[in-house]
Image (tube, helix red, strand yellow):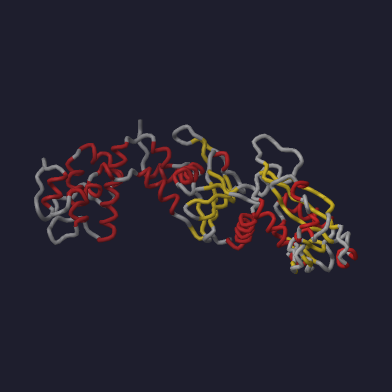
Amino acid sequence: MAKFTDEDDALLEELGVEVDSKREGSRTPREERVIAGFEEIQRFVAEHGRGPQHGEERDIFERLYAVRLERLRELDDARMLLAPLDDQGLLSAGPLAGETIPDDIDDDELLSQLGVDVAAAAAITDLRHVRTAAEKREAEEIASRDRCEDFDRFKPLFQQVQKELDSGIRQTRPFELKAEIRPGAWFIVGGQKAYVAEVDELFTNAQGRTDARLRVIFDNGTESNMLMRSLQRALNKDDTGRRITDPAVGPLFSGEQEKDDQATGTIYVLRSKSDHPVVSANRELVHKIGVTNTAVQKRLAGARLQPTFLMADVEVIATYELFNINRTRLENLIHRIFDPARLEIEIKDRFGNPVVPREWFLVPLFAIDEAVKRIKDGTITSYVYDPGSARLRRR
């Protein structure tokens, strides 16, 4: 079977064919390691403008590269494998200057002669520990990122997602399936939030598996066109890797619980029967908004004896069941939304001490309903409550 030449590779790349993945399956692990070791020598030559040399005055890495290059020159199969890659003519050069290393010396003895601690340097010199080209490509693809020229377009999305995480509208979950990688999906990988902005058409790689090229935007203003399977591997290998859920995970507020949903509590809206002058004059607008993980009626037991209920009986106006959401964060979110309309009222507890309850708001019920709707569809972070118009308005 004919092998691909450099010209063939260039043509394949112009046609959009993944050259490296096509070749990957045709090389043995040993061949990959030999190529990886030779590429390290090539990088040394490109950086220093000369081949590696022996000699006690040389850097240990240079001396090791020199030994490695001599061995590669002596192996017929290595020369045949590396010949198409040898654009610097390293394999055809003469013997290297410096000390002579016997042909039959093993790695440990070689290191000892070079004055290197064997245990510390074994992983550096032994080709068995050199990463394969495939492994290096995978790592480099994940780490290699370009500056995102249109990051201004994505920055508000990252800010909104962070707000939604803080408020509990979104959550982080363990990454499980490749199917979770789709346009618009969010992840945390390598300690950074990542947004899948684009997904190209699926194709079958050399191993017969489906894959696709992605455009992934990171919260530090960089981007990568990594493969889907590269992102999948990175998430699986990262102990802290997570996926970020969509704003609505299951029925956020619903009277019906679906399979596998976990009930976490109830939002309740109350109206007071207090005869306090402020409450009496605004009874249709004064509402208490709270969250409980117990039955609402049980929570309201003895309301007339509790300052938080204005030392009076209350009427339940609306309730919303919660599923798969953080109760405390949600309550804090709702209270922040209506903070401009928070009712500042002082009452006396049963011992005569002054108390200022914090969960009562001078807000119409339809505004509360709209806020619940905005929380459900994930748009609440774009709105604030305007007491003047008694409505939610965009920021």
Residue under the image location 63 percent in, 58 percent down = 163
Task: Using residue 5 as the reference point, say whether residue 180 is left or right of it.
Answer: right
Please tell me in which quadrant of the rendered image residue 359 appears. Answer: bottom right
Residue 208: give x, y in percent of width and height.
47, 32
User: As rendered, which of 31 and 115 lies closer to the eye?
Assistant: 115
Q: Residue furthest front?
A: 351
Task: Using residue 245 as the reference point, say whether residue 47 is left or right of it.
Answer: left
Residue under the image location 28 percent in, 44 percent down = 129
Please tell me in which quadrant of the rendered image residue 306 appears. Answer: bottom right
Question: In the rendered image, which quarter contains the N terminus?
Answer: top left
Residue 369: give x, y in percent of width and height.
80, 53
Residue 272: give x, y in percent of width and height.
84, 58
Residue 255: give x, y in percent of width and height.
77, 41
Task: Using residue 277 as the reference point, say whether residue 111 is left or right of it.
Answer: left
Q: Residue furthest right?
A: 281
Q: How many marks?
A: 0
> In the picture shown, does residue 8 fall above or below 43?
above
Task: Using residue 227 as the reference point, say whether residue 267 is left or right of it.
Answer: right
User: As rendered, which of 37 and 196 lies closer to the eye?
Assistant: 196
Question: In the rendered image, which quarter contains the C terminus?
Answer: bottom right
> In the picture shown, does residue 80 fall above or below 45?
above
User: As rendered, which of 221 and 92 lies closer to the eye?
Assistant: 221
Residue under the image location 51 percent in, 58 percent down = 222
User: As rendered, which of 371 and 266 lies closer to the eye?
Assistant: 266
